[in-house]
Amino acid sequence: MSELPRPALSVVAPCYNEQEVLPEFLRRVGAVLDAAGGIAEVVLVDDGSRDRTWEVMTAAAAADPRIVAVRLMRNHGHQLALTAGLSVCRGERILIIDADLQDPPELLPDMMALMDQGADVVYGQRRQRDGESLFKRATAAGFYRLINRLTDVDIPADAGDFRLVTRRVLDLLLAMPERHRFIRGMVAWIGGRQVPLIYDRHARVAGESKYPLSKMIRFAADAITAFSVVPLMASMTIGWVMAGVGLGFFIYSMVGWVMHSNLPGWTSLMAALGLLGGMQFLMLGIIGAYLGRLYDQSKGRPLFMIRDIVGGPK
Ligand code: UDP
Ligand code: MG
C-alpha cells in the first residue's frame, strides 16, 4: 500500500452518531474535491456510533473510491477519533473538519491558497457562531482566555480543530506520544507558520452537539493539564506560604510560652501543629515540582523541531 502515490489531500472527519448529516457532508465535500481536482481521499472515522453512521459510511465508501471508512471498537471521544483518522490518512495536506458541517468545506480553496504561500497550518478562526447557545459561547470564550493565561503556548482563541495542515506538521503531531490529546494545542505547540482564516461558524446541519457539559469539562481539564504545570506549581507556592504561616505559629506559641501567657498544653499543641502543617505543605509542593518534571518527561515530546538547515558541505 505504501507504494501507491500519496493523495494530494486527505479530508479527515470524526463522526459520532452523525447519520443525519453524513450524506450532506459527503455531498458538499465531494463537490469541493471535484472542483479542486487532483487526487484526494476522505477518511471518515466512526467513533463507536450507536446509530446507522457506519452503514452510511460503508455504503458511501462502496460508491466512491475516494472514501475510506474507519470504525473504532468503541466510543473514544472526538480527539482520539480524530487521531485515529489522522494516523490512517495518507495525504500530503490534511484537512481536519467536523462532520456536522458547522465548518464549511467550501473554505478549502482559500486554505489551500494560504498554504501555497508557505503556511504550515491554516486554521479556521470563528468570527461568529450561529446556532450555539450563549452558554456554549461564554464557556468557550472563558476557556480560551484561561488556557492562554496558564500556558506559554499561543493557542488561538475561537479556533477549533478545523484546519489544513501539511504532512510535515501531521507527522510531528503523530510523533507526540501523549495520551491525553488536545490536538489544537498540540498543533499550536509545533509552531511553524500558522495562519488564521476568519470565517462564520454555522449551526449544525442536523443532529445535536455531542459535547455535553461533562465532556466539555473533561476536554478543558485535558487541555490545561497537558499544556500547563501552573496548577502543580501553585502547590509549591502554597507550600512556601503555609510553611511561613506554620513557622509564624511556632514562633508565636514559643514566645507565649517564654512569657508564661499560654494555657498549659497549648504551646506544645500549637508548636507541633505549626511546624508539621507547614512542613507538610512544603513537602507536597516539592513532590509537586518533581511530579511536574516527571510529567513533562513522560509526555515524550521532542525537545526541538528543526525547520530548515542551510549550508554546510555538499
Ligand atoms: N465526535 C466524535 N466523538 C465524540 C464526540 C464527537 O467523533 O465522542 C465528533 C462529532 O461527530 C463531530 C465532531 O466530533 O464531527 C465535533 O462534535 P460536535 O459537533 O458534537 O461538537 P461541537 O461542535 O458541538 O463542539
Ligand atoms: Mg459541532
Image (spheres, grey):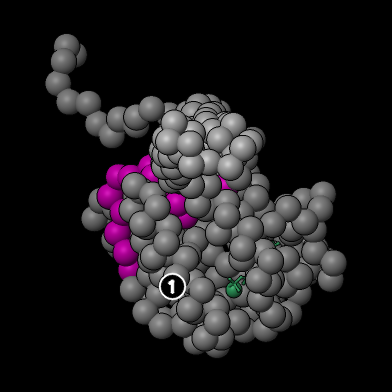
Indicate if the residue with disc 1 has its beta carbon within 8 Å of ligand 1: no
Residue drawn 43% across the image and 36% down it: 259
Magenta-drawn segment = 181-197
Residue wearing tag 1: 141
Magenta-drawn stretch contains 187? yes
Residue drawn 47% across the image and 55% down it: 184
Residue drawn 32% across the image and 64% down it: 196
x and y, in percent, of residue 311 in the image = 14, 21
- In this rendered view, identify the residue nearer to me: 216 or 234: 234
Residue 291 vertical position relative to residue 128 in the rendered view, above or below: above
Residue 214 vertical position relative to residue 66 in the rendered view, above or below: below
Q: What amino acid is found at the position of numbered circle 1 in the picture?
A: Ala
x and y, in percent, of residue 156 in the image = 36, 61
Tell me if I can see residue 269 in this picture: no
- In this rendered view, identify the residue nearer to me: 298 or 66: 298
x and y, in percent, of residue 26 in the image = 63, 71
State ligand 2's quadrant.
bottom right
Using residue 171 as the reference point, say whether residue 18 is left or right of it.
right
- In this rendered view, identify the residue nearer to me: 87 or 92: 87
Residue 135 vertical position relative to residue 177 in the rendered view, above or below: below
x and y, in percent, of residue 82 in the image = 61, 54
